[in-house]
Image (cartoon, rainbow, N blue to C red):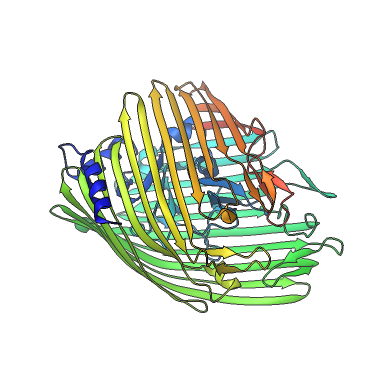
Amino acid sequence: MGRKTWLILLCLVATTVSAGDRLESLLERYSQISQLYRQTVEESEGHLIVFTREELERFQYRKLSDVLQVIRYFTLQRNQFGEKILSYATIYPVENSTVRLFINDHEVSSVFRKTALPMWADLPLDFVEHIEIYQGESSVKFNNEAAGMIIKVYTKRPERENGGRIRAEGSTRKDYGLNLYTGMETSKEGAFSFFISRSRYLSRKYTDGPVDVRINERKWYSYIQFKIKGWNFESGFVEKKSGRFRGTGIFYPPEDSDFEGSHGYVSLGRVISPELNLSFRLYADKINTSSYQKGSISNPVLAYIPVQTVLWWSTDISSYKVGADFSGKKRYGRLLISFGGKFQKTGYTLYDTRDLLTIKDINSSKYGSVFTEGIYNLFSGLGVIAGVKFEKMDRRYGTDINNILWRTGLISIVDEGRYFKIFLSRYYTPPYFIEIYTNPELGKQKNDVITAELSEKNRFGRFVITGGYIKVNRAIMIDPLTFTYYNSEDTLKYRFYSVDYKKVFRNILFEAGYFNVSVNNKAYKTAPSAGGNVKMSYFTEGFSSFFEVIYRNNYSFLGRKIDSGLNLNAGFRIKPFENSFLEVKGYNLAGRGLKTPAYIDPDFKYTVEDRRVTLSFIREF
């Protein structure tokens, strides 16, 4: 970027500045005004979307996927196995390894596929305080590997709750859910919380050839937290059992299929230096998945890596992750320095068994990184941000990675709802295990990004405009015939913008938003490129109601035109007696939700949520 451009941007930022506190003080004030109990917001770390506890209640966001449906620049879809995938605008939902999901400070992305949502997308929110979503290049400060978006789910603080809730729900599709949460203070220096959930999800039947198939998922979720004398112990677990939905039958779904998966983790952390805000954490994850498909002579199963048509196909993957990380920050006059590092070992063992072949594959990785980032106050309310991170990744096989990631920008915060931010960054997306398994010579993807955000709040409401440009070299792509990953020789250029509006009228909250993404090569446009939403809620202690309309535009995939989607959700809540609530929520009520064509069979189309109505009873104690 030329000097003139930087001068223009600097002048633009300067016009938003008024006399006041230093930037960090304004950031802190912004967090306080947001009414989040946990002051976790890192306003300088990207383009932030916050779903407060109040908003989660207002719009009856009961599970994480309810929230993910309305995120700008993304579309929540299912793949042909019925798994939920959050895909970037214009990109078909095969995998998305650059979206990271955290529960508090622990990342729950899988080891082999490097995506969390197939297991964690339907995480219930009864034990969640709020959700922060950082769009942009937040890979420097959050102590994770390179990421384009970070989702941070923060749990309720047990010392604040000193109580709990029970939820029981059912739906017109005959699925159900049972949730229990309790949290309490156990002593002056101790607290405890516990959550457990059991659910079943049933979709409508889809007909493909002579076969009727539906999504049938059973899930367990659990979470436990202990706080004792400055130590914080957390553990989470998910178990999922389902079929493979459309699967990879050549002509129609396989006659039999099964999937079982589990992911458990433990995390132990402590603040070891209040002066430096220095915290240290140890963690470990264990992940197991097993899938099976049975075809027939007339309808064999397509197995891949290598591609074969077989009568049956089974894969078993056992993986692990162990590591330690630390982070802290220190102020030197006008300069606030953040620093940290991470050391991690991951690995997996894969067994691929089919009627014609048996494959065993083992791989592992050692990962290390250190980062530092500073915010320097040029003058009141205006700061310069600069960060750099070095990461090294050595693998048993596959290309080793040595990356230097950097990010710089300007940020000005005048007061609540009035700010301007601009970031310039370069980061590299390394190939992960699932990609290296298909191509050990696969190289890293280079990303150059500039993004900006302007927010203005006045008596007419709050307006937020974001926009940017991404240039991608050696993009990691999948070959639709061989299912192997490769580095594209094409340079991809994405331009994007969004406009969001929010207004509170006493007990009524109104929100609306629109986004648009364009790519220079239309051959790579295989999913919606534009979308938006309109939401409204009315909320009182005894009664509340809401509706939301989620829009995604039409697109083409393998020669098939897919119509635009208009997903209408609505519901209400009443309080029949003290500490008890009844909630009614309808999903996809108009039956016009966006359809996704199956990767292997694009004439087979389905929606992320079928039309259904759920009834929930909640008891708080």
Q: Residue at x 39, y 43 (%)?
A: 466
Q: Residue at x 55, y 53 (%)?
A: 117
Residue 16 visible in the current orientation: yes
Q: Residue at x 86, y 64 (%)?
A: 297
Closer to the camera in the image, 572 or 503 = 503
Quadrant that contains the N terminus? bottom left
Residue farthest left in this picture? 333
Residue 272 visible in the current orientation: no
Residue farthest bottom in this picture? 396
Closer to the camera in the image, 558 or 141 = 558
Q: Position of residue 563 (x, y in %)?
A: 65, 40
Q: Is residue 481 above or below residue 536?
A: below
Closer to the camera in the image, 3 or 556 = 3
Q: Indicate left or right for 235 with 44 as reference.
A: right
Q: Is residue 204 above or below residue 577?
A: below
Closer to the camera in the image, 9 or 413 = 9
Q: Residue at x 74, y 64 (%)?
A: 302
Q: Indicate left or right for 457 with 207 as reference.
A: left
Q: Indicate left or right for 148 with 573 as reference.
A: left
Q: Position of residue 107 (x, y in %)?
A: 45, 57
Q: Position of residue 543 (x, y in %)?
A: 50, 21
Total tally of numbered discs in the picture: 0
Q: Position of residue 538 (x, y in %)?
A: 47, 23
Q: Indicate left or right for 35 with 56 as reference.
A: left
